[in-house]
Image (spheres, helix red, strand yellow):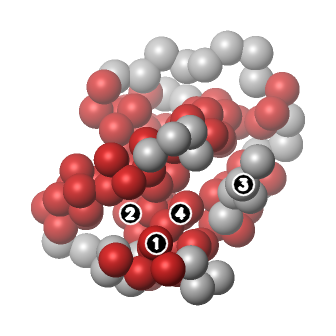
Amino acid sequence: MKRIPVILAAALLAAPGAAQVAAAPRLSLEHRMLLRCSAAFALVAHRQETGDASAQQYPPLKERGSEYFVRASARVMDEAGLDRDAVSAALRTEAESLLVGDTLAAIMPVCLSALDATGL
């Protein structure tokens, strides 16, 4: 299994018991997309830092991706009324699903458009 990048791991570890959250929260499609792109940016930024050639095709995501991650997580917490544990669990689920097949590569064009739309 591939490793989850430091920024995503930090967010997950900052919420004690996040792995024990029993049920996934009910999130809107928009909230899921915010979390999915946050996880995608964290994964790609980590791969870029480690020199993974496949990640170099994307713009640098360490700074912009991290800021998107923080803002999106805060927005989902506020709008969906979730605590840190629930958001961390949802992020973990999204990150794990992106590691299956070519899912990460398939979602990146959409996520990069979303990132550009934020003006970050």
**Can you tell which mark lies on residue 68?**
2
Which residue matches tag 3?
2
Which residue matches tag 1?
54
Q: Residue at the location (49% across, 67% down)?
A: 44
Assess disc 2: are there few (<14), some (14-19) or many (≥20) residues with their C-alpha within 10 Å of its C-alpha: many
Assess disc 1: are there few (<14), some (14-19) or many (≥20) residues with their C-alpha within 10 Å of its C-alpha: few
Which residue matches tag 4?
42
**Can you tell which mark lies on residue 113?**
none
Q: Residue at the location (51% across, 41% down)?
A: 101
Q: Amino acid at mark 3?
A: Lys
Whole-number angstrom distance, CA of label 3 to CA of label 2: 23 Å
- Element class at badge 3: loop
Between tags 4 and 2, which lies in front?
Answer: 4
In the rendered image, the vertical position of residue 72 relative to residue 120, given as above or below: above
Whole-number angstrom distance, CA of label 3 to CA of label 1: 14 Å
Q: Residue at the location (42% across, 22% down)?
A: 27
- Element class at badge 1: helix
Residue 89 figure quarter: top right
Assess disc 3: are there few (<14), some (14-19) or many (≥20) residues with their C-alpha within 10 Å of its C-alpha: few
x, y percent for residue 3: 74, 58
Whole-number angstrom distance, CA of label 4 to CA of label 3: 13 Å
- Element class at badge 4: helix
Q: Is residue 46 visible?
A: yes
Q: Earlier in the sequence, mark 4 or mark 2?
A: 4
Q: Are marks 1 and 4 in contact (CB under 8 Å)?
A: no
Q: Amino acid at mark 4?
A: Ala
Q: Amino acid at mark 2?
A: Tyr
